Image (cartoon, rainbow, N blue to C red):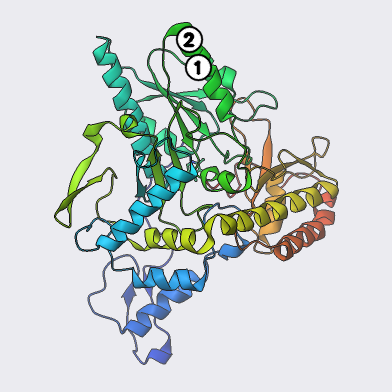
Amino acid sequence: MLKHPSNEQPGRATMTLDPRFGIENLVIPRNELAPDELPPDAAYQIIHDELMLDGNARLNVATFVTTWMEPQAERLMAECADKNMIDKDEYPQTAELEKRCVSILGRLWHAPDAVQATGCSTTGSSEAAMLAGLALKRRWQHRRRAAGAPVDRPNLVMGINVQVCWEKFAAYWDVEMRLVPMEGDRLTLSAEEAVRHCDENTIGVVAILGSTYDGSYEPVAEICRALDEYQQRTGIDVPVHVDGASGALLAPFVDPELIWDFRLPRVASINASGHKYGLVYPGVGWVVWRDAEALPEELIFWVNYLGDNMPTFALNFSRPGAQVVAQYYNFLRLGFAGYRRVHAYSREVATRLSARIAELGPFELLTHGDQLPVFAFKVRDEIRNFTVFDVSGALRERGWQVPAYQFPKNRQDLSALRVVVRRGFTHDLADLLIEDLRRQLPRLEKQHAPQHDSTTAAGFHH
Ligand SMILES: *Cc1c(COP(=O)(O)O)cnc(C)c1O
């Protein structure tokens, strides 16, 4: 059974201060507010030292989230640390940069009328998913009410490989999650299965551009086509939301011929994480609706902006402006060619690294890193004495964070390791990773039995 989270803290209740600060016998409580002040240098040092135990972000190939930005971007972010995104009146230029980013994304994703496409920044794709899901739910309610039909049992269809934010959406907003299980080699949603799970209570289908499990794109165009046929057959019109947390800021640059966005009339909205392949430090996501019709009026709130009214739809109120400014910096600095260059390099690193891992012998690739620059691999079935969880543990000894995880229904028999390649992960770092993996193999191969399984694993990160 899952333990309910509590405030119980492990370890000692107090901290001591390094003698160099010249304050003797000071007892500093760890888990409660201290009665007195500390000099700023002492407070800084305590926290700085404690954070040394965090992993090295650059060796973390578990996360999709940006771990390197240019110093100029960092400088801009520091300059904007005090700006509140919601104060459109006080910081009109920050608001203007947000509007430009939405406009850039609307065009990048081929909104039929870029002026009509509406959207906003969020704290990440999770908040964006809440907003997009809510819009789907409201539109469905309007359609049903107009037809005099009940609105009490909405459902949302998606593959079981969805990110946890969709489970949250379903739980917070009372929508049934219709999860399509995996089957055999099919580890994502298929068009056929998507349609099979739809009915008159379906508010939408979520298609993922870049599954977090293995980096593969779901067939958005096929799903839309199948839903067109479904509408012809049944009269039921099911919109599609594309969860492009990773892929929506990658595919337009490196797979421009792939049709997954607003070029498909059925795609109502798209979300992306600015802090993944948008190349910004954590704290920014985006959601864009294809046109005004896709975003119900009642979800829009108006705030005062230079004597004018500006629409907002985010869940949060106060929010830092720095990430939005950094997003605009990247758009301005890199342009189309720059994003293409950065992401093409990541894909080159990912495909070369996956090929070299396949050559080692004991591993089999599930994906190759040729869609998202992300790939998953497993230990060959005939190998019984070590598991992917042992491999993950062995790499951890050298500081690499390569998560191992079990797949969901109906592929719980399958466990894999996953590598996420992103900006800052070079061929050189990939070579170091492969050398460390090669060095650990003889020891793993000598093992008599697996040492780690899914219950002792470090876990699967977004
Ligand atoms: C990362 C991710 C999310 C959640 O995004 P955050 O920006 O971390 O909130 C949702 N969906 C997919 C497919 C993701 O990869």
Q: Look at the picture and state if 257 lies above or below 320.
A: above
Residue 199's spot in the image, x, y percent? 43, 13
Q: Secondary structure at mark 1?
A: helix
Residue that badge 1 annotates: 228
- Quadrant in the rendering for residue 38: bottom left
Q: What's under tag 2, amino acid-wise?
A: Gln
Residue at image location 22% in from the left, 75% down from the top:
35
Answer yes or no: is residue 438 visible: yes
Q: Is residue 183 left or right of residue 433?
A: left
| Amino acid type of the residue that numbered disc 1 sits on in the rendered structure | Asp
Residue drawn at 29 percent across, 26 percent down:
138
Q: Are marks 2 and 1 in contact (CB under 8 Å)?
A: yes
Q: Secondary structure at mark 2?
A: helix
Residue with the mark numbered 2: 232
Q: Is residue 7 visible?
A: no
Quarter of the rendering containing residue 85: bottom left
Q: Residue sitting at 52 percent across and 48 percent down? A: 249
How packed mark 1 is, by other alpha carbons closer than 10 Å (few <14, some 14-19, many 20 or more), is some
The numbered dot on residue 406 is: none
Relative placement, left or right, of 290 versus 68 is left
Residue 73 vs residue 163, the one in the foreground: 73
